[in-house]
Amino acid sequence: MSENPCFTCVGTPCCRRLPLERIKVRTRSDLKSLLEFLRHRWFELGLKDDGTWMLFYARSCQNLEADTGLCAVHGTPQQPWICRSYPSYHCWYERVFAGEQSLEFIRFDLRRLETLCQMVSYDEDTGEIAGVPSWEEMIQVFSNLPLDDPASRALQGIKKKFSFSLPRPRNEGQEQLFKFRRQFFGVRIIEGRREWITEVETYGEEIS
Ligand code: SF4
Ligand code: SF4
């Protein structure tokens, strides 16, 4: 087998953003609600070519060595199973986050999403999305709008927290997801009886 692609991966994007949620968008208000994330530091959104939105928390894993860009717990029991089992030879992260604009995934910051909101048409009665630009048109339009750095937002802003709930894990595999999430800076897991909450810290501008 050829050399592990992780050893030459530029920027190790899988270790610098935590996937938080998959979001279905059907209405004007669903789409507008995504804007709120992008007004806050460290949130990043992406749209897959199957229409699924993905929300990421763009901070690094605490095991990522700043000087080498390598995983300090690679191959040890401390490395989360999610990382150990990830199919790096067919890496989705590298395809969509490293290098040129991907043809299967479009990344969004606030400016790109506001632009998309203007390109979409809605049913005036129900607010449901009635028409969207073609995938090719979106690729073309957004390729000309450079992305911001999610870490540069709201530098004078106030600290806030966002929470994301999942059912309490019922098996080792589900617990591993939370082990993985705990590795990232700014993340806290609150273990409830029915739900475990992933709480992430962020900063946003105060609305006057
Ligand atoms: S899993 Fe993918 S994104 Fe992560 S270091 Fe390996 S090749 Fe890069
Ligand atoms: S533990 Fe996983 S996410 Fe963290 S640096 Fe290692 S491979 Fe990357």
Image (tube, grey):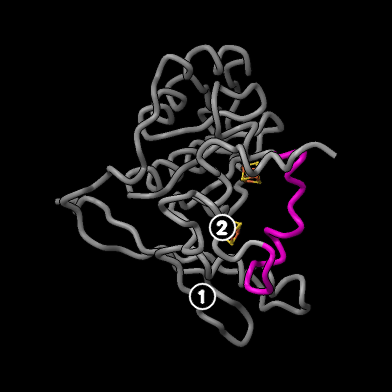
In the image, is residue 8 above or below residue 103? below
Determine whether, in the image, residue 44 is placed left or right of residue 154: right
Q: CA distance from mark 2 to mark 1?
A: 22 Å
Residue located 54% across and 26% down the image: 99
Q: Secondary structure at mark 2?
A: loop
Residue 126 in sight: no
- Residue for point 49% across, 38% down: 31
Q: Quadrant of residue 100?
A: top right
Give the residues drawn in magenta, as a range: 75-91
Determine crowd level at label 2: few under 14, some 14-19, many 20+ residues with C-alpha closer than 10 A. Answer: some
Name the foreground residue: 9 vs 41. Answer: 9
Is residue 193 something that shows in the picture? yes
The type of residue carrying mark 1 is: Ile
Question: Badge 1 is on which residue?
Answer: 189
Q: Which SS class for mark 1?
A: strand
What amino acid is at disc 2? Cys
